[in-house]
Image: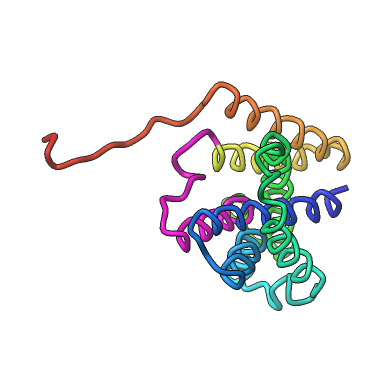
């Protein structure tokens, strides 16, 4: 199940990256590059930081074709994308959860300590979007709008707690997915966010 969700997620993330590139009036190469980085950037950063070589996507060339193809197809389908906005939000939430769990699993297999496992999950979940926004010259959305990185943290902690207590793997996955999805969609619906830190020298 996790593999299927992962493939759906990287496709959706690639298309969302292409849309952001389109708002910045990038050419086809720019769209393809941003799509690829959005979809696979989180896992790449995780593998580099953890010393997990070779990097995952280099062993699966199909991921390259899938993400770049999704990005370029978005250029043709862009006029219909506004009708799929809610679907994209759902797929993005599913992708966040899948990426987080996969990131935790990778760090566990490398025998890292608990804090590193949690951070690996979060980095896998959110860093593709951060790289996308940096390259598109905007403040990373995952750090300033509705709960997003916080959802990744919650999913990672819940997943690891259930594992620790020996809960069945399928139940652990379903509970993590259900809780994470409910929290993310609720945050979108009711605009839940963390307190914002605003600093300006003129105010002091």
Q: Residue at x 71, y 67 (%)?
A: 68
Residue stretch rendered in magenta on the structure: 121-147
Q: Position of residue 152 (x, y in %)?
A: 61, 42
Q: Position of residue 4 (x, y in %)?
A: 86, 52
Residue 194 in view in this figure: yes
Prevailing secondary structure of the magenta residues: helix
Residue 161 in view in this figure: no
Q: Residue at x 39, y 30 (%)?
A: 195
Q: How many marks?
A: 0
Vertical placement of residue 169 versus 18, above or below = above
Q: Position of residue 44 (x, y in %)?
A: 63, 67
Q: Position of residue 153 (x, y in %)?
A: 59, 41
Q: 88 or 77: nearer the eye?
A: 77
**Would you identify the image quadrant in which residue 49 lies?**
bottom right
Quadrant for the C terminus in the image: top left
Q: 3 or 153: nearer the eye?
A: 3
Q: Residue at x 47, y 59 (%)?
A: 136
Vertical placement of residue 60 versus 138, above or below = below
Q: Residue at x 68, y 61 (%)?
A: 71
**Side (left or right) of 98 relative to 149:** right
**Side (left or right) of 193 relative to 125:** left
Coloring scheme of the render?
rainbow
Question: Residue 142 magenta-drawn?
Answer: yes
């Amino acid at each position: 199940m996790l593999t299927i969700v992962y493939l759906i997620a990287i496709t959706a993330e690639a298309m969302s990256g292409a849309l952001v590139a389109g708002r910045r009036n990038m050419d086809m190469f720019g769209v393809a590059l941003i799509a690829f980085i959005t979809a696979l950037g989180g896992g790449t950063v995780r593998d580099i930081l953890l010393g997990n070589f070779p990097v995952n996507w280099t062993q699966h060339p199909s991921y390259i074709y899938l993400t770049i193809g999704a990005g370029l197809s978005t250029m043709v389908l862009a006029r219909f994308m506004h009708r799929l906005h809610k679907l994209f939000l759902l797929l993005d939430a599913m992708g966040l959860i899948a990426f987080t769990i996969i990131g935790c699993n990778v760090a566990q297999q490398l025998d890292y300590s608990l804090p590193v496992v949690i951070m690996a999950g979060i980095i896998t979940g959110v860093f593709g979007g951060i790289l996308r926004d940096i390259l598109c010259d905007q403040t990373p959305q995952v750090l300033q709008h509705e709960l997003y990185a916080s959802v990744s943290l919650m999913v990672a902690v819940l997943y690891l707690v259930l594992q620790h207590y020996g809960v069945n793997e399928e139940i652990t996955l379903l509970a993590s997915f259900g809780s994470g999805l409910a929290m993310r969609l609720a945050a979108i619906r009711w605009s839940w966010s963390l307190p914002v830190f605003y600093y300006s020298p003129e105010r002091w």
